[in-house]
Image: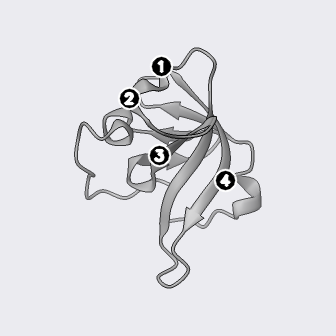
Amino acid sequence: MSKVFAKNLSNKQVMATDGSEVGILFNIVMDIKTSNLISLIVKPDMALDTSKYRQEGEYIILPFESVRAIKDYIVIDKAIAKGTKGPQKETADI
């Protein structure tokens, strides 16, 4: 897995595997003891129905397990992000 610097993720577009726009990455939550990434905090796209996502104020919280790839966009699996499908064992293509 390639390394990606956190500063390169700031304001990166978040897309779903079906091609729909989810929003813009605002911040990342990391467990300091284990260095594991826990979740992404995303400013949702105006057209996104946020009712099925975990919300905190004006942001939605996406589990890091939902990330499928990080390149030009951060690509997530919406079913995992919404909690309707368990996390996959495969890792993100970074």
Residue placed furthest toward the bottom: 33
Q: Quadrant of residue 60?
A: top right
Q: Mark 4 and mark 2 in contact (Cβ < 8 Å)?
A: no
Q: CA distance from mark 2 to mark 3?
A: 11 Å
Residue placed furthest toward the top: 47
Q: Please, what is the three-letter code of the amino acid marked with disc 3?
A: Leu
Q: CA distance from mark 4 to mark 1?
A: 20 Å
Front one among 73 and 53 = 53
Q: CA distance from mark 1 to mark 2?
A: 7 Å
Whichever of callouts 3 and 1 sits on the residue coming sooner in the sequence is 1
Q: Please, what is the three-letter code of the amino acid marked with disc 4?
A: Asn
The residue tagged with tag 1: helix, strand or loop? loop
Q: Please, what is the three-letter code of the amino acid marked with disc 2?
A: Lys
Q: Please, what is the three-letter code of the amino acid marked with disc 1?
A: Asp
Judge the density around disc 4: few (<14), some (14-19), many (≥20) Cα neighbours within 10 Å: some
Name the residue that disc number 4 marks: 27
Residue 81 spot, x, y in % from top left: 39, 41
Whichever of callouts 2 and 4 sits on the residue coming sooner in the sequence is 4
Name the residue that disc number 1 marks: 49
Name the residue that disc number 2 marks: 52
Residue 18 spot, x, y in % from top left: 41, 23
Determine whether 50 is above or below 61 in the image. above
Q: Residue at x 32, y 42 (%)?
A: 80
Judge the density around disc 1: few (<14), some (14-19), many (≥20) Cα neighbours within 10 Å: few
Q: CA distance from mark 3 to mark 4?
A: 11 Å
Name the residue that disc number 3 marks: 62
Whichever of callouts 4 and 1 sits on the residue coming sooner in the sequence is 4
Judge the density around disc 2: few (<14), some (14-19), many (≥20) Cα neighbours within 10 Å: few
Front one among 12 and 2 = 12
Whichever of callouts 3 and 4 sits on the residue coming sooner in the sequence is 4
